[in-house]
Image (cartoon, rainbow, N blue to C red):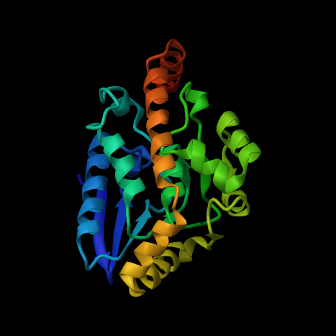
Amino acid sequence: MNHIQVRDDQGVRIISFNRPEKRNAFNLEMYQQFTEYLIQGEADNDIRAFMFHGTENCFTSGNDIVDFLQSGALDDNHPTVKFLFCLLDLKKPVVAAVTGAAVGIGTTLLLHCDLVYADNNAKFQMPFVHLALVPEAASSILLPLIVGQQKAAELILLGEAFDAQTAADLNIINRVVAQDELISFSLAQAKKLAALPPLSMQASKRLLRHNQAEVKAQMKLELVEFAERLQSDEAKQRFQAFLKK
């Protein structure tokens, strides 16, 4: 079954996560598919914007832990690493629509999106320290820039869940939208972006994200630390406890 689905609509490439039996947890195959659809969309002049969303009750619960622990070294060829740097390097604008759980990568990937909307059922969480790990996807640099150093420390070090209104108040998302309107509203916003002059759009996004070299360097540092933490005794204990649940 294809757990990453894609369709194109009036210049918007819509990428949806469809693994509801695992709460849309990302496995390696999903990361590979996601990256391929992004690369194809970047190369297609008819695609001018991207939109991401999950299923009706879940954005994504993060990584598939069992799959991830068996995935090998976090080097440049790792599907997750390829996805992260592809997401960082996207030239075209990205809109995300979030309902239900947005855990781990489900929250940190939003920091790379240009417009993010969520309904009242959305729950965000970055439980990296709970798993004896560290932040990823450059969240350790992007989150303080968005919410401030002290609030970023609270969200990452305590790793507690927070709701959509909190995410909006912190500028992690743009707006809270009614659940029955979320997808249509988000798609309408993406189509607005797609209808505007594409080269100007891409240049404006590039100017807004002028610190990409610094962000990329931080992402690389995170991956080194993440890989070390992943092999630690405390991480192994945490994962064993998590899997027993």
Looking at the image, is 222 positioned above or below residue 227?
below
- Rendered location of residue 163, percent (x, y): 68, 55
Image quadrant where residue 75 sits: top left
Q: Is residue 227 left or right of residue 98?
A: left
Picture quarter containing residue 171?
bottom right
Residue 125 visible in the displayed image: yes
Q: Position of residue 18 (x, y in %)?
A: 36, 56
Front in this rendered view, residue 5 or 49: 49
The residue shown at (74%, 46%) is 151
Q: Nearer the viewer, residue 234 or 3?
A: 234
Q: Residue furthest top?
A: 233
Residue 95 seen: no
Most foreground residue, 50 or 180: 50
Q: Residue at x 38, y 57 (%)?
A: 89
Residue, x 41% and y 49% (percent of image)? 24
Task: Farthest residue to the right: give it.
Answer: 150
Displayed quadrant of residue 41: bottom left
Up/down of 114 relative to 135, above or below: below
Q: Residue at x 44, y 63 (%)?
A: 53
Relative height, residue 48 to residue 162 (above, below) = below
Q: Position of residue 175 (x, y in %)?
A: 64, 70
